[in-house]
Amino acid sequence: MKLLTGTLVVALLIMIGYIAIQYTETMPGLSDPGECLNLDVYTEYFRSDVYNKKLPYSKAAGSRVCLVNYKNATDPTWNELISFLNSDDTDEILYIEGSFVCADFAEMLHNNAETAGIKAAFVCVDFASDDEDGHALNAFNTTDRGLVYVDCTGEGFLHPVSHSQIFKDSTRYCPHFNYSCDKIAYIVEGEECGMINIDKASALEYWFYEDYAAKWNEHERELEAYTSEVNEYNRAIAAHDKEVKAYEAAVGGRTSISDPGEYERLDKRYKKLKAREKELDVTGDELETKRERLAERQEDLGWYRWKPLSVVTDVKVHW
């Protein structure tokens, strides 16, 4: 009886080992960080450094958000975070209702970051406006600059607005220039949720977003005024050219005019045209100076900005 029991134990151990081998070969691996493993025993016994966390939020397909966390993931520096965001292509996916929405983006960026060894959080934001649903994004606790909110939601959710309003109220792809959808989010309860592209977000405090938005507003007002002045200048140039052609037609290619009265009239027109030409040259130089100043400011601000979301009422951060 003892021998039989021992044999059964050995056989059982062999069977468990075989099942474990088969289990590890057939289980979905973590190479797809967006997939949540359903069997907790997998991470408990086979990947002790990894654990899953399901959140009470739904993705586009209806499944719950699942975070794949790595126990050895660490908080990044600011530069490490920016380097990761620049290399990650989550923001290049299109936002499509019913297919891939903000929760999908935030889950993917979280899991990609954890796979890369960077500790990340999934963030849910609620808004005061009844017309605007909540939003999902991410957070990182950088070692040198503190908590950073990141929104990588791709094209189709928000549309960048250029100084010429290329993207204003448009839901279509506009290939006038390439742009990144990686954004630093500025989130404070009771304030609008602002976004700045990661290469222009030199400070993380909310005052910086307010200052940035104010500079953009002033810049756009000056651009509008400049455009109006340029249009007026171009009309003046066209009118001047027309008068020059009329004068040249009146002269008719003559190098001398015998009639004193005609000569006086043409000479008066000539001097008036030359004076006008000088005025236009001065105006053109002034416009060029304005253009250079506006171009410098445009370079500082970036060639596009993101429209803000509604006023934030609640923020939930899930690590």
Image: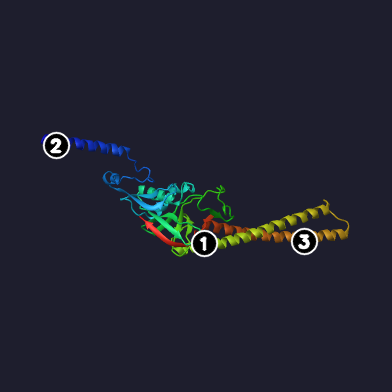
Q: Which residue is mark 1?
A: 213
Q: Is residue 83 visible?
A: no
Q: Which residue is mark 3?
A: 272
| Image height of 205 relative to 21, above or below | below
Q: Residue at x 13, y 34 (%)?
A: 4
Q: CA distance from mark 1 to mark 3?
A: 46 Å
Which kind of residue does numbered mark 2 sit on?
Thr
Q: Is residue 148 visible?
A: yes
Instruction: Give the mark nearer the N terminus: 1 vs 3.
Output: 1
The image shows a total of numbered marks equal to: 3
Q: Residue at x 49, y 63 (%)?
A: 210
Other residues around mark 1 within 10 Å, as few (<14) / some (14–19) / many (≥20): many
The answer to whether 10 appears left or right of 272 in the picture is left
- In the picture as drawn, the residue positioned furthest to the front comes out as 1
> Which one is in front in this view, the residue at disc 2 or the one at disc 1?
2
Residues at circles 1 and 3 in contact by the CB criterion of under 8 Å: no
The N terminus sits in image quarter: top left
Instruction: Report the coloring of the rendering.
Output: rainbow
Instruction: Give the mark nearer the N terminus: 2 vs 1.
Output: 2
> Which one is in front in this view, the residue at disc 2 or the one at disc 3?
2
Q: Secondary structure at mark 3?
A: helix
